[in-house]
């Protein structure tokens, strides 16, 4: 049986049309965009076209507001550090959510070593920011508010427009990490009111090795790489023309197919959760339920009494690629910081599995995964789990479905916030 990828948060396959568009720029059209000759002009025109494609995808006012980097991580670093350096005479304080991606939080930690300060705003049990809490965290020395559009671990969609309004009221920059959601959720930077927004094209069928940062013309931004005047002087280094061309095609296709992708993955997401909830006891969905407050491409699940790493490995042995924890922190067995931030029980946090969907997944694949996970993976791992044995003997209780609530064999449970997951 063919293998099935259910780990599209980590990356996605390259679109055939993106690959075809890239091919000439590896060999025939190899000029540098900085050169004045015809070969350079051809490369520069290719970059201009890609900027137009990304501007159209996110509603940017001008293609010149699109900057290309080496990836989503660099785009995040450029936004946070670039704003901090540019605005440091005004203040040294940054406000971000507690559930940001490691690229955000580690950039903040780097800046703190240089004398900047930050506030990490707590979230509720589904990972959602309260705009009033963000407002309370802002001081007269705050120079940036940062959040994400959809969470990389639990899929929560943040109230970005409300957060951006707070930034606008105080005259400070608002940065949004859309590296998980770009190409999957509708984005209009003008409507949202954001100043900077990062994208990772390899997560919506573009190539790896290329990132995008939208910068509103009014946003002050210092470069963090030096040695050239590329990207309007804000990102030195010869541009990766083939990857930029392929990313532009992926952006154009994403804009055209967005509505269909949303509907398709949304149906699969609901089908997947309904099937697992019905067949697996003591299983919990982390983050909001399928619907308008959750990105339709992923589910973060905690299956009690078994660890996420074992689940991922056994799924892999049965032909399904899935993930546990963030793909950028997957080599660590520590509790994912997002799950810690929402107050999830440590045992359930270690039991988490992330299943993320793509445009080419099918209902038959989802049904097969449900069958394998419920019929093979969970029984085998629980059969080797001392804690499952203790639960069966009644010496310990379930966190998800405690016996006192009559939930011994129920797959449905309250989430960390107390709401039914």
Image: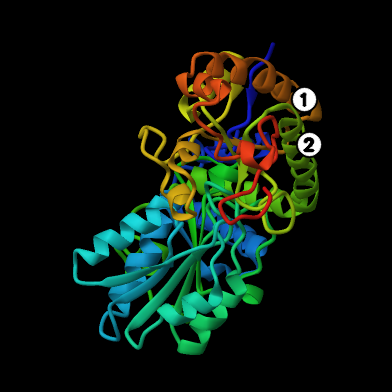
In-image side of 280 versus 385 (left or right): right
Coloring basis for residues: rainbow
Q: Is residue 283 above or below residue 371?
A: below
* Mark 2 or mark 1, earlier in chain: 2
Between residue 318 and residue 305, name the one nearer to us: 305
State the residue lying farthest toward the top: 1
Q: Could one spot residue 338 in this view of the protein?
A: yes
Q: Is residue 125 above or below residue 222?
A: above
Q: Where is residue 171, by image quadrant?
A: bottom left
The residue pinned by badge 1 equals 367
In-image side of 281 versus 261 (left or right): left
The residue pinned by badge 2 equals 271
Q: Secondary structure at mark 1?
A: helix
Q: Could one spot residue 225 in this view of the protein?
A: no
Tell me the number on the disc at residue 403: none
Q: Which residue shows up at 63% across the image and 64% down it?
A: 58
Between residue 233 and residue 145, name the one nearer to us: 145
Residues under labels 2 and 1: Cα distance?
Answer: 8 Å
Q: Is residue 391 above or below residue 341?
A: above
Q: Position of residue 1 (x, y in %)?
A: 69, 11
Q: Position of residue 120 (x, y in %)?
A: 39, 66
Between residue 224 and residue 11, name the one nearer to us: 11
Q: Position of residue 72 (x, y in %)?
A: 46, 51
Q: Which residue shows up at 19% across the image and 71% down it?
A: 115
Marks 2,1: beta carbons within 8 A: yes
Q: Which residue shows up at 28% across the image and 78% down it?
A: 92
């Amino acid at each position: 049986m063919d293998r099935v990828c259910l780990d599209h948060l980590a990356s996605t396959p390259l679109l055939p049309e993106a690959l075809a568009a890239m091919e000439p720029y590896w060999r025939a059209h190899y000029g540098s965009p900085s050169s004045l000759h015809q070969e350079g002009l051809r490369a520069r025109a290719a970059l201009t076209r890609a900027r137009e494609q990304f501007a159209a995808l996110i509603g940017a006012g001008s293609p010149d507001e699109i900057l290309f980097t080496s990836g989503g991580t660099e785009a995040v670093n450029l936004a946070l550090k670039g704003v901090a350096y540019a605005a440091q005479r005004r203040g040294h304080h940054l406000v971000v959510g507690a559930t940001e991606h490691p690229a955000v939080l580690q950039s903040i930690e780097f800046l703190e070593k240089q004398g900047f300060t930050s506030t990490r705003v707590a979230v509720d049990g589904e990972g959602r920011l309260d705009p009033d809490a963000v407002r309370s965290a802002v001081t007269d020395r705050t120079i940036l508010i940062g959040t994400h559009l959809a969470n990389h671990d639990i899929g929560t969609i943040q109230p970005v427009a409300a957060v951006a309004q707070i930034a606008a009221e105080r005259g400070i920059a608002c940065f949004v990490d859309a590296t998980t959601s770009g190409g999957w959720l509708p984005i209009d930077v003008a409507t949202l009111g954001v100043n900077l927004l990062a994208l990772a094209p390899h997560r919506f069928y573009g190539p790896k090795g290329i990132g995008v940062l939208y910068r509103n013309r009014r946003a002050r931004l210092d470069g963090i790489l030096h040695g050239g005047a590329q990207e309007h002087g804000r990102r030195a280094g010869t541009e990766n023309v083939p990857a930029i061309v392929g990313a532009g095609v992926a952006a154009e296709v994403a804009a055209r197919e967005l509505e269909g992708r949303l509907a398709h993955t949304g149906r699969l997401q609901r089908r997947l959760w309904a099937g697992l909830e019905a067949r697996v006891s003591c299983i919990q969905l982390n983050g909001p339920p399928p619907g308008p407050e959750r990105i339709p491409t992923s589910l973060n699940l905690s299956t009690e009494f078994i660890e996420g790493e074992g689940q991922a490995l056994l799924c892999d042995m049965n032909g399904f690629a899935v993930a546990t924890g963030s793909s950028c922190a997957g080599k660590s067995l520590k509790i994912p910081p997002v799950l810690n931030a929402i107050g999830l029980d440590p045992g359930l946090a270690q039991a988490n599995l992330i299943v993320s969907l793509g445009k080419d997944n099918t209902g038959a694949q989802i049904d097969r995964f449900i069958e394998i996970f419920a019929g093979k993976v969970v029984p085998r791992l629980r059969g080797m789990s001392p804690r499952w044995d203790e639960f069966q003997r009644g010496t310990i209780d379930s966190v998800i479905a405690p016996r006192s609530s009559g939930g011994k064999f129920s797959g449905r449970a309250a989430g960390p916030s107390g709401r039914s997951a």
